[in-house]
Amino acid sequence: MEIVRSQRKPSIDASPTPTLSLYRSAPPLEVRLEDFELYAIDRLRVLKGISDGLARGKKPEEMENLVRELWKTNMRHQDPAEVMNKDIISHFVLRLVYCRTEELRKWFLSMETTLFRYRFRLESLESQRMLMTEFQLPYKALIHAEYETVKDKLVQVARSIGQSSNTDTIFFKVPFEEVPDLVGSRRVFILKGFAYVPMNQVVSLVVTQFRSNISKALVLTNRKWTSTIKEQEKDRLTPIVEALSNSYLGPDYTQPNESAEISLKDIDQLASNSFPLCMRHLFDKLREDHHLKHGGRIQLNLFLKGVGLKLDDALAFWKEEFSKKVGAERFDKEYAYSIRHNYGKEGKRTDYTPFACQKIISSTPSVGDHHGCPYRHFSEENLRAALNKMGVGGRQQDEVMDKVRNRHYQLACTLTFEAIHGTSCDTGINHPNQYFSNSQKIRQEKVTSVES
Amino acid sequence: MAKERIPNEGDEMQIDGGVCEERVARAIPEGFNPDYLKIYYGKLFPYADMFKWLSYGNDGKHPACDHSYFGRREFSFTLENDIYIRFQSFGSAKEMENSIKEKCPFKIDIGPVYSVDPAKRHAYAQGGNNVFAPVERELVFDIDMSDYDDVRYCCSGADVCLECWPLMTIAIKVIDTALRDDFGFNHILWVYSGRRGVHCWVCDSKARRLNNEHRAAVTDYFHVYKGGENSLKKVTLAGPVLYPFLARSYTDVLKSFFEEKLLRSQNLLASEERCQKILGFIPDESVAAELLDKWQGNRRSSISKEDVNVVRWDQLKHMLQSGKQKIQGLRRCVEEIVFSYTYPRLDMEVSKHMNHLLKAPFCVHPKTGRVCVPIDPNNCEDFDPTTVPTLSHLLEEINEGSMMMESNNEWERSSLGKSIEFFRSSFLQPLLKSCKEEMESAYSAKIKQSKNSLSW
Ligand code: SF4
Ligand SMILES: [Zn+2]
């Protein structure tokens, strides 16, 4: 940590030294309380921006630009010597903020890893190498003789992902388990269980390592937080940490809202009035086919839970449909378990939270699946038909399709919302349950204004 | 022991005294029946082999054996009245055998090996320290013909016939080759699911220890279908060349299967509607329209000798791949069509999670009465789902054979014998051999390490 600090002499831009920290240990730095909070808020802006970018389904190159911009705007400091400190301090503050529940840890881990991934890609080759050494990754470059035997395939893989094959790239041969993302997207050649990772993809190896370090560290931080820090710092840091975690997370859709209980008899009406398209599609398909595949069941069920449908009602709802297709017994045997499981009544994991748009948009529905986000996963023709069904046509529909074409799926959804409800929705749609509760609020206001 | 048992049960079989051949034949109608199943479990089910397999060498005397291993495996039973019992576990082969014989399950599912005995999971939950979680599980795949309903016209849903079954055969070829060559797995068991699909069990120790993220990576590697029911194209192949695995699957298996078999057997281009469906893959509407024109023309013209599907396919290929079509997307279309109609369709969820259950080999399917026998991936085109041993057929064999007590093992004489023999020689023996080797080398490494640490 301190070594890193001394390396960062002000403004040597061409320096090959990595500007990237691995955040191995908390900084032994004096931190002013205001900085503590301000740095953290700046970093949160970056992470939020990344989260939005992912939700919009941005491509890697676009993400790279986005991250560069976000970092530049939010993480600078008038004193160049402080830049690295700001990075490190803000990271460790947010660790405290985000270590406290599984859900928070997951979000933080995923955003920090994404941030690291793109910052790593922006580093020079030399400093990438240096970072690899710093991680102590035990990989050796592929020797020439072996390279020759697989050369053709390596070229083929590079071409298959639209990259020009550079014959003097260095390759690392690693067990395929070390680069699951590259294997899953067929971006590396694999042979007999080994992946041949070119230098320009090495980021995956490093990220795997980074991710597992941070993941372990977060669990430790959580332990320390509950056992000591929280109490020790109760007059100083604790209030700040607590405020940070509330102010920037937006409303919490993770727990069913007790006051907003809904009942089974209203569900069809609610579905056609206030469900976002993704859920309405699943709902309609379930009524029509009396069946949904796994991905659809979980997406809809968690949403219904978030909307306030009680477990018993949920079971009755699913059973009514499924038994028409597979019979009541098979429902009880094969499906009821996972419905209850989503509600946290079976199995160990108690907290299944409704999916946010980002998660739904990045899912990969397959043949026969109906889950996912229609703005992203429908063909143009099907999407237009669905919009017509919702009463969104003409120019409004064209505007929605425009957003879709630019891959702004959540904005498309927001426009749909606005068209249907006739009011603007400034916050934008980030979560199907938010769509639902905003819609309900507006409808209730309308009802009361008519009555009074 | 077996010698004593068989005459007794043989007697039971012949309750009415010396049953003659014809009566037996009449007494055992095709299909499924719980009484037959009892006899099957009593005489034919290969308990010892199943136990050996799922012990992975831990049932031996080697000091590195983990004797708790088999007992931490989850089994679940579906009983006659559709009662479903999960988290069964057995301390020994005998325990498993007794339980199966007693409960006579219509279906046996195999789950993961857990950190603790799954039957006692509640007791551990109180303790707090020992989390109950899956620690090992074969990498499994489930391919079901009902997922191919949009590309087969001979049957749908639960039915299969010899026209569509080859879709399974090529799925086996594509996946099996990749598991071995690309992922380096060696101990792979393919099993007929008893009705309309196949299951695959990858049993290498490396495969059993993959976490969920790794499993998802392997599954995604095999995944080419994009977009759910509501998007137009089922397969999109991007990039100027195909990824090696896809290219190999295409040239070695899919292309010839599509052109030489499927096209004709499913009459993929024989009607207007089916033609339209294939033309839907072509992004350039004018090209699609030109083809349709051609095809409407040659419907009447005399192409009596040649198959209409083949003729039309050749025209399509010619049109899309001719020098005129510079746009790469159009050339790629041909491959996309072939992939969409032939590439294996995996049930992704089954493969991605350690704790998914999968039906055990050698179960009997309660709807068809067929035994879930292993399939040899090297000769999978010879496998015929309509001729696998059925429960009633096996019983006939037992009855015929019960007079002559030549053998200790009923199955050796039954038509199940070949399947069990194959299971042993091609799968179990090589598997156990490498389990033993791994165990020994891990053990000696450990000894060496502890010696080293002593010398400090
Ligand atoms: S943007 Fe979100 S709420 Fe709207 S359809 Fe897509 S996933 Fe559903
Ligand atoms: Zn068929």
Image (cartoon, coloured by chain):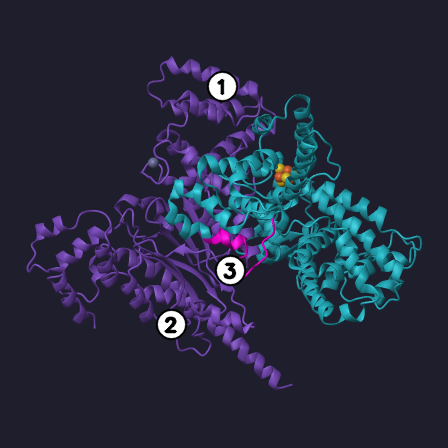
Q: Choose mark 1 or mark 3, whichever is in front.
A: 3
Work out whether mark 1 precedes mark 2 in sequence or the reverse, and give the earlier one: 2
- The residue identified by callout 2 is B91
Chain under numbered label 3: A
Q: Label 3: few (<14), some or many (≥20) within 10 Å?
A: few
Q: Position of residue A26 (x, y in %)?
A: 79, 66
Q: Residue at x 20, y 70 (%)?
A: B2
Whether residue B316 is visible to the viewer of this picture, yes or no, is yes
In which quadrant of the rendered view does residue A19 lie? bottom right
How many numbered marks are there?
3
Q: Which residues are magenta?
A: A337-354
The picture's colour for chain A is cyan
User: Residue pushed farthest front?
Assistant: A452
* Front in this rendered view, residue A202 or A277: A277
Instruction: Decide whether residue A306 is among the magenta residues.
Output: no
Q: Position of residue A376 (x, y in %)?
A: 62, 36
Secondary structure beneath label 1: helix
Which labelled disc corresponds to residue A347? Answer: 3
Q: Residue at x 50, y 73 (%)?
A: B441
The picture's colour for chain B is purple
Q: Label 1: few (<14), some or many (≥20) within 10 Å?
A: some
Secondary structure beneath label 3: loop
Give the Cα separation between the discs numbered 2 and 3: 24 Å
Chain under numbered label 1: B
Chain under numbered label 2: B
Residue B128 shown left or right of residue B414 in the figure? right
Which labelled disc corresponds to residue B291? Answer: 1
Q: Residue at x 6, y 59 (%)?
A: B18
Helix, strand or loop: magenta stretch: loop
